[in-house]
Image (cartoon, helix red, strand yellow):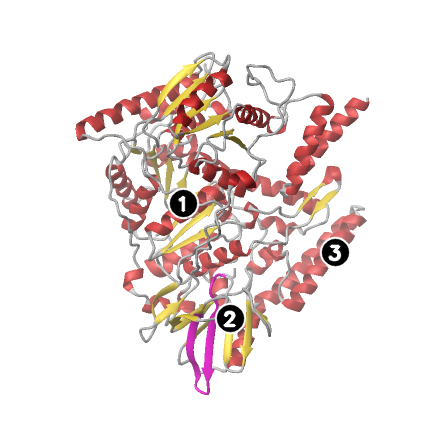
Amino acid sequence: MSQDVDPFDLSKALEGAAKSHLDPSIAKFQLQAEYGLAGEQESAIEKTLSQLRNSQSRCVMLGVTGSGKTFAMANIIETLNIPTLILSHNKTLSRQLWQEMSGLFPENAVEYFVSHYDYYQPEAYLPKRDLYIEKELSMNERIEQERFSTVASLVSRPDVLVVATVSAIYGLNPPETFLQQHVRLHVGQQVEPQDVVKELVGLQYRRVTGEITRGELRLRGEVLDLWMPSRDDPLRIRFDLEGITRIQVCEAVSWESIDEIEEVWIHPKEFFMTGPERFEKALEDIEFELQERIDFFEKAGKDLEAHRLESKTRYDLDLLREIGHCRSIENYSMHFDGRTFGERPYCLLDFFAACAQTFHGSKEKFLVIMDESHVTLPQLGGMYHGDKSRKENLIEHGFRLPSAADNRPLMGHEFQSLVPQILYVSATPGERELRQLCETTGQPIQEADPKEKRKPLLKDALGEIKGIARMEIRPTGLLDPAIEVRPTEGQVQNLLEEITSCTQKNERILVTVLTIKFAEEVADYLQRMGVKAHYLHSEIDTLERSEIIKALRIGHIDVIVGINLLREGLDLPEVSLVAIFDADKEGFLRNERSLLQTIGRASRNENGRVILYADRMGRAMESAISQTIERRQKQIAHNERHGITPKTIEKPLPVMGIEVGELLAGTAGKGMTGGKRFVGGSSGQTRTEHERDLVKKFDLGAGSWGDDIVANLSQPTSVSLPDGVIDTGLRLVERLRKEMNQAAARLDFEKAAKLRDRIFQLENSNSN
């Protein structure tokens, strides 16, 4: 951006509108719940609030499974009353959080923001296979709608809570640029319909004559119909000789009026828009960079790369000149933003800073809460390197200009520098969070013993670090589960007996193993023994995973066998037993934090217990067991003092086959004459469908039972192939080829290519 433009200054765009005329009632977060604080929630909230109010930049809240972390977060948000971003490490958990927060803050702007990269394969090139993968074009309309709704709320109202995945650190255009490109209309405004249409076409809205969809408009006489990308409900604007007489929010199918508003804020149809002068300058810069890069390739004797780059870039330039947009416009964001090479891109955090400055007086007045921080924080730090590797291949081989590399996620240090305050929330805080807490508060940092060459245990770190807000007492009085350790010999048969006991009491079971193959084998064995079982792993898509988990709660399934997908964020009160196979196999899936997370899945049921199948007491096992026992004793003592009897959480059963898509209403206070004003929030109706029987939808058997499976089904001790696949010869090739096809069907082309390379190596080695 130019030096004379403040990208965070929204005052001009909001002059005479939101800032002066917002209803005070919606300018404040209002928590609505039928229950109050209990257990250790109040003390943990008070401790955290004290730290945040004292400008402590990094805080840690330890909340065991079932301790009410979401409700605690909501209370902190209401008290601080500043824009808040909640980050989660995957789209499923973030959606769940969004639903919960929407229920707790029904009067405020609770938004959901994920990147298309969470769902679709981005543009990529695999040099070893000479395979170019086009950017996925079939973008999900709901995702785009929610993204627009998020940024529109942030630039138009102060009470915004956004739940997002870590993809929130991907690039967006600057807030000031987004706001410059908008149209604001109000009742009584003297303006011609054709003039409004011209402005909207300039914002990339498409004019049609028939039925309209999101991003389109239709003018019939003195009636203008418009459907903003962020909305479930279109607008009907009526004119007469004096100008605008009515602005109606309409039902999308019948076009019946469902609301009357006084003012509407219309945002651009597309991201990465800019003004005419900046646009022309950007095209010149792209042309200049293109010529430089062509010269570079030609001097290096890379005529193919030069031709490829020129063809693709000039095609994009032609589209930009003709319609003002192209499908790969984000690759040129550096030029449209006016940034220099290496300068970080703008992202959602910049919209938070703008919102904080405009409505709360300072860029620093917003909060980031990182849920399941032990997973989310490392993932956030690793996104930059994955994107960089992909972009380098595209640039090196002439598919993109070097400036495309600056359309990227934030680096770890960039993210940390942009966020004034972070609250890390987890049942098992990671080393990074604890280190940051120590650095912030001036405490000594626990280092690994050089003799042992092992990282310090979480148990030891938690005992030494001060300032951690703890919630280890559950409001329900539920205890950490009882733990048994049993030998691995005959573990599957032993588990079968326990399953029979649980199912007789209408309780559910989770089983965790180390490999995909073994998960399928165990599930199939249980199915053959008359148990309603199903496996759950990374090769099952997100929608099916959700449906399988719903089926477990309803009773279509009694047992789920999985790997690491059964850890964070699952709320399954019907589960009374968690079985962990080969618990003594040290590694990522059996380290201290993983074991604690998995054990926690049984803590929402009054009969909760965990069986660890192991032949020795490993270091991680010992620490996880001792922490669980200590907490359980503490919880028992608390219950005895307060006369609490633990009782299983009662949670409404889900309905199969329904995708929750309800969005909050986007009216924001009052306009100049007292009527409601319309901003970029979103609204919608919950879509209902007939319940579908999962037994019919899925084959609840888990695949074919191998002839070579021994009676014990003992877990393999080492895994070297992708996703834990263990086999030999032709069977291995067949299995890898199946996985490759499945990955390609999921649009996970990078994984498919890796598997194809592995198959190629195996086939060549066999032929030799």
Q: Is residue 441 left or right of residue 415?
A: left
Expressed as whole percent of the image width and height from the top left, the position of residue 236 reads 47, 73
Question: In the figure, 216 relative to 34: above or below?
Answer: below
**Percent coordinates x, y for residue 335 in the rendering:** 60, 58
Instruction: Determine the secondary structure under disc 2.
Output: strand
Q: Residues within 10 Å of mark 1 (few under 14, many from 20)?
A: many
- Residue extending furthest bottom? 241
Instruction: Work out whether residue 367 can be spotted.
Output: no
Q: Is residue 181 left or right of residue 387?
A: left
Residue at mark 3 = 310
Q: Quadrant of residue 668?
A: bottom left
Residue lying at 68% horizontally and 51% vertically, measured from the top left:
400
* Residue 247 among magenta residues: yes
According to the picture, the residue beneath numbered tag 2 turns out to be 226
| Residue sitting at x 18%, y 30% | 643
As rendered, which of 223 and 362 lies closer to the eye? 223
The residue lying at 63 percent from left, 29 percent from top is 722
Kind of residue at disc 2:
Leu
Q: Position of residue 491 (x, y in %)?
A: 49, 16
Q: CA distance from mark 3 to mark 2?
A: 38 Å
Query: Which x, y percent locates residue 392?
Result: 66, 43
Q: Which residues are magenta?
A: 230-249
Decide whether the magenta segment is chiefly helix, strand or loop. Answer: strand
SS at badge 3: helix
**Amino acid carrying mark 3 in the image:** Glu
* Front label number (1 vs 3): 1
Point out the image quarter for the C terminus: top right
Label 1: which residue?
97
Distance (Cα) linking label 1 and label 2: 31 Å
Return the mark for residue 108: none
Could you tell whether 537 is left or right of 574 in the image? right
